[in-house]
Image (cartoon, rainbow, N blue to C red):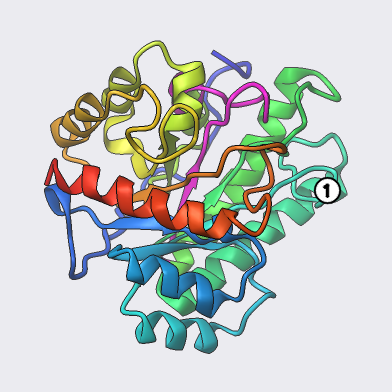
């Protein structure tokens, strides 16, 4: 287990947050959605149009509260009949000062403010969940001791959980693979972290692409996450459309069914090519992604 010492006083006793419900539900009542960031800097209206045209129920919006006015987002979602499923954290470090585990207190405080701003924006646009990373993305080793960075991150997440309860919007931490982050890379790491945060408003996201690198058994990781699994990302093992890699999608969907998962399943895919952090590689990338969305939804619906 990462971190040190026993459980510190947390915010146990919070009320259980409500799960969001809506129309257009798929497998086991879950909504199928797409991460909007995969279309890069395209206008939001264009991206929502592509996602809606592919037949999805909703969208995971970029976690950039200052980019759009909430009412503008609500109108755009309504025009395309898409549900707001979550916000994606953007914690690239040092490009952004959003690192809950950083030895610099000022950076940690900015990271907490970022989560709070995302929670408030999510409430205004109707999204039930904000994703957050426990440490800065692309930081692959501790700057201080690992235990200190673990506790700094836990303490920051506890502070954010207070705002999550106030807004009624949940937080989900996401384990990333070892080539993108270092503090939380597996479901086991995430569960240990959540035990220390000790808030019903904080759970986890599992992503099949990251899990294909870090988990010996993706279905087993889903089952281990159980009630703590708030959100789910889908992409094949090469981060392309479902069916283009070697992900055992039937076992993944069965594990979700077995745990009673009732959240969203959100596609997060990228075209092949250089720079794993840049989805739009060239002028053909949007059309490649359109194809990936169609292929993946057809496979998901096969398990509905």
Q: Residue at x 49, y 51 (%)?
A: 288
Q: Around disc 1, counting alpha carbons within 10 Å, would you say few (fewer than 14), some (14 to 19), or many (20 or more)? A: some
Q: Which residue is mark 1?
A: 107
Span highlighted in magenta in the image: 168-191
In this rendered view, identify the residue nearer to me: 265 or 224.
265
Viewport quadrant of the N terminus? top right
Q: Position of residue 301 (x, y in %)?
A: 17, 49
| Relative vertical location of residue 229 with respect to residue 107 in this rendering, above or below | above
Q: Position of residue 145 (x, y in %)?
A: 80, 18
Q: Residue at x 68, y 54 (%)?
A: 282
Residue 183 lies in the magenta stretch? yes
Q: Position of residue 155 (x, y in %)?
A: 65, 40
In this rendered view, identify the residue nearer to me: 124 or 159.
124
| Relative vertical location of residue 173 with respect to residue 68 in this rendering, above or below | above
Magenta stretch: helix, strand or loop mostly: loop
Q: Residue at x 45, y 84 (%)?
A: 76
Instruction: Identify the element where label 1 is drawn.
Output: helix
Q: Residue at x 31, y 27 (%)?
A: 222
Q: Is residue 220 visible?
A: yes
| Relative vertical location of residue 219 with respect to residue 283 in this rendering, above or below | above
Q: Is residue 223 found left or right of 80 in the rendered image?
A: left
């Amino acid at each position: 287990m990462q971190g040190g010492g026993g459980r510190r006083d947390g915010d146990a006793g919070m009320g259980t947050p409500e799960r969001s419900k809506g129309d257009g539900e798929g497998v086991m009542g879950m909504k199928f959605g797409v991460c909007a960031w995969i279309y890069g800097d395209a206008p939001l209206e264009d991206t929502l149009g592509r996602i809606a045209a592919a037949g999805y129920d909703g969208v995971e919006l970029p976690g950039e509260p200052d980019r759009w006015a909430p009412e503008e987002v609500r109108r755009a979602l309504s025009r395309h009949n898409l549900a707001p499923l979550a916000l994606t954290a953007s914690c690239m470090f040092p490009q952004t000062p959003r690192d809950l585990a950083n030895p610099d207190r000022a950076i940690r405080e900015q990271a907490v403010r970022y989560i709070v701003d995302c929670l408030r924006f999510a409430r205004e646009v109707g999204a039930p969940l904000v994703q957050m990373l426990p440490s800065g993305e692309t930081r692959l080793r501790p700057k201080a001791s690992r235990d200190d960075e673990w506790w700094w991150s836990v303490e920051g997440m506890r502070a954010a959980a207070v705002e999550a309860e106030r807004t009624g919007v949940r937080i989900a931490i996401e384990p990333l693979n070892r080539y993108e982050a270092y503090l939380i890379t597996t479901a086991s790491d995430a569960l240990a972290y959540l035990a220390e945060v000790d808030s019903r408003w904080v759970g986890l996201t599992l992503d099949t692409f990251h899990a294909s690198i870090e988990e010996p058994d993706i279905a087993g990781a889903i089952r281990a996450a159980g009630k703590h699994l708030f959100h789910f990302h889908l992409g094949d093992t090469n981060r392309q459309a479902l069916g283009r890699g070697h992900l055992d999608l039937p076992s993944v969907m069965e594990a979700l069914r077995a745990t009673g998962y009732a959240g969203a399943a959100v596609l997060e895919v990228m075209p092949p090519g250089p720079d794993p952090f840049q989805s739009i590689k060239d002028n053909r990338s949007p059309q490649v992604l359109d194809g990936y969305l169609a292929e993946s939804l057809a496979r998901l619906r096969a398990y509905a």
